[in-house]
Image (cartoon, coloured by chain):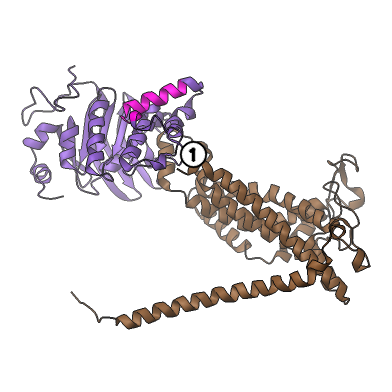
Amino acid sequence: MKTGRTIPQAKRILSNRLMWAACLGATTIAVLVLSALLITIAIEGTGALSWSFLTSFASRKPAQAGIIAPLMGSIWVCAICAIVAIPVGIGTAIYLEEYARRSRIKSLIQLNISNLSGVPSIVYGILALVAFVRFFGIRSADDAWTFGNAESIFYLQIPFGPSVIAGGLTLALVVLPIMIISSQEALRSVPQSLRQAALALGSTQWQVVWHVTLPAALPTIMTGAILSMSRAIGEAAPLLVIGGFLLVFQTPANLMSDFTVLPLQIYNWAGRPQSDFHKIAAAAIIVQLVVLLAFNTIAIIIRQKLQRPLQS
Amino acid sequence: MEQPTTTSTPHSHSGSPSIGEPMTLRNDTAIEMQNLSAWYSKNQVLHAIDLDIAAKQVCAFIGPSGCGKSTLLRWLNRMNDTIPGARATGKIALHGVSLLDSALDVVDLRRRVGMVFQKPNPFPKSIFDNVAFGPRLHRIYSRTDLEELVEQSLRASALWDEVKDRLTSSALGLSGGQQQRLCIARAIAVGPELLLMDEPCSALDPRSTASIEELIRELRATYTIVIVTHNMQQASRVSDSTAFFYEGKLVETGPTDVLFTTPKERRTEDYVTGRFG
């Protein structure tokens, strides 16, 4: 048996300390940058925050401008995105993890999903412009298929045009790969022994998924959903491509409404020369952060609710 | 058709067949295997197994690791279907129903064949929901019927007295031995004809092992049980008949006391006396 040379104790302790210091340093940098950002925004933006800021439409005068349109737009678009991306993402993950046999096609799909998660979101914007906004040019906007009354909440036209639903679907495309991959990882972390137990009791594949795998994976899936929605609410580029408006003087009434979102509004205001607009841009960023926190809180509450029966 | 008494002497075979005589079954045959071979991809793990297992008895599969005993067990409820590349040829029949038939409804088969795994694997649900899991998959029960069924199953697995006051708390809070008895209750609740146990005590301490072994002896009155074990003493304590496997072949089978005291094959003797394995 070879015994090897002993590593001096002092060296091991030193390297341990160095790594500790390096990791602490990395954390400090991250925290410092983030707090610097938050503090600047807070200083600049809090003055502009008021009830009327939240409830007014955009204006040429910074003092009268508000963010009701982009706020409601963001909520609408993200809700549509969540309704589409979360079930489709979980469904795809279930298919790939629980049903699909190992095959070349499965690896190909898997590879593509991984690649898609790295595609710049503006590319999705171009795809969405063709598919959702223009409907591949099959029908022009003047000659659209129309369902329902323009005043009704169920009003729908195909092609969608640069509407709330087109925006929501665009964001769904952007976040779908993240949603699929995180759900897959959640499902993969469920112990195989639980699936076996359910199968051995005479479960069908679907019963295994519904009663065992999915409940066990759901808390982690919800974490993936939070990440996805955080990404969606911060996206501006793909919505700019599909023709999201910068100035909107109405809140969405149905799926066909024009819309703008908070990141677009912030982009618009932050680009203006007058410093008063920078102040309301900072205020809008604060609102966006609050909306994001609210989304995450809801998701965490749901996760806690789901987790409760699993605890002893 | 004599049924050994379950409590006093677990394997009191009156008139064991003498050496060299083909083994005659004292009971109805539950499982018949003929010329059964099995593969994982190109790797053959079972070679032409011929084996009959009697109903309402405990049959132990023994042999060194990798001898194919667990594979064989997992063909009895077709759990190998979940492993890509697993296949088998030959014949297995459970009460006359061919198990390797591609048209067989495996979901229904697994309802008739319960399985207990090596490591206790309760669902992260309440004790009640664990036991009720199987029944709920197959039928719709009234609340009272379900409660009765859960109680019966927990009594049958000798767990009722320990858990009756905390049926709604998580199964994960139970000790390892209790969890394994819960898994047995869960398997029983579906009303199987056959219980498969894949080294059910290997993750348990001696006391829990003793309680599971006692339970197995009691369950024999109602179920046909096949148990895979690495523990020679366990095989001799709980089983009526034993099959010894080596390198994917069935070396010897017979009543447990015969196989352990006067084995026909040299390899069997070496294994059961602990000379290898």
The quadrant in which the C terminus of chain A is found is top left
The image quarter in which residue A61 lies: bottom right
Read off the residue under disc 1.
Answer: A208
User: Between residues A135 and B117, which one lies in front from this camera angle?
Assistant: B117
The image quarter in which residue B68 lies: top left
In the image: residue A146, left or right of residue A31 = right
User: Between residues B66 and B190, which one lies in front from this camera angle?
Assistant: B190
Q: Crowding at label 1, few (<14), some or many (≥20) Cα neighbours within 10 Å?
A: many
User: Between residues B277 and B18, which one lies in front from this camera angle?
Assistant: B277
Q: Relative to A136, is B144 above or below?
A: above
Q: Relative to B129, is A295 above or below?
A: below
The quadrant in which the N terminus of chain A is found is bottom left
Which chain corresponds to the colour purple?
A: B
The chain to which mark 1 is attached is A
Q: Relative to A51, is A61 above or below?
A: below
Residue A136 visible in the current orientation: no
- Where residue B108 sits: x, y (%)? 43, 28
Residue A65 lies in magenta, yes or no?
A: no
Query: What is the total number of numbered labels drawn onto the structure image?
Result: 1
Which chain corresponds to the colour brown?
A: A
Q: Amino acid at mark 1?
A: Val
Residue A170 visible in the current orientation: yes
In the image: residue A202, left or right of residue A1 = right
User: Between residues B126 and A246, which one lies in front from this camera angle?
Assistant: B126
Residue at left 57%, top 56%?
A181
- Where residue A238 sits: x, y (%)? 76, 63
Magenta residues, start to end = B145-161
- Where residue A30 sits: x, y (%)? 60, 73
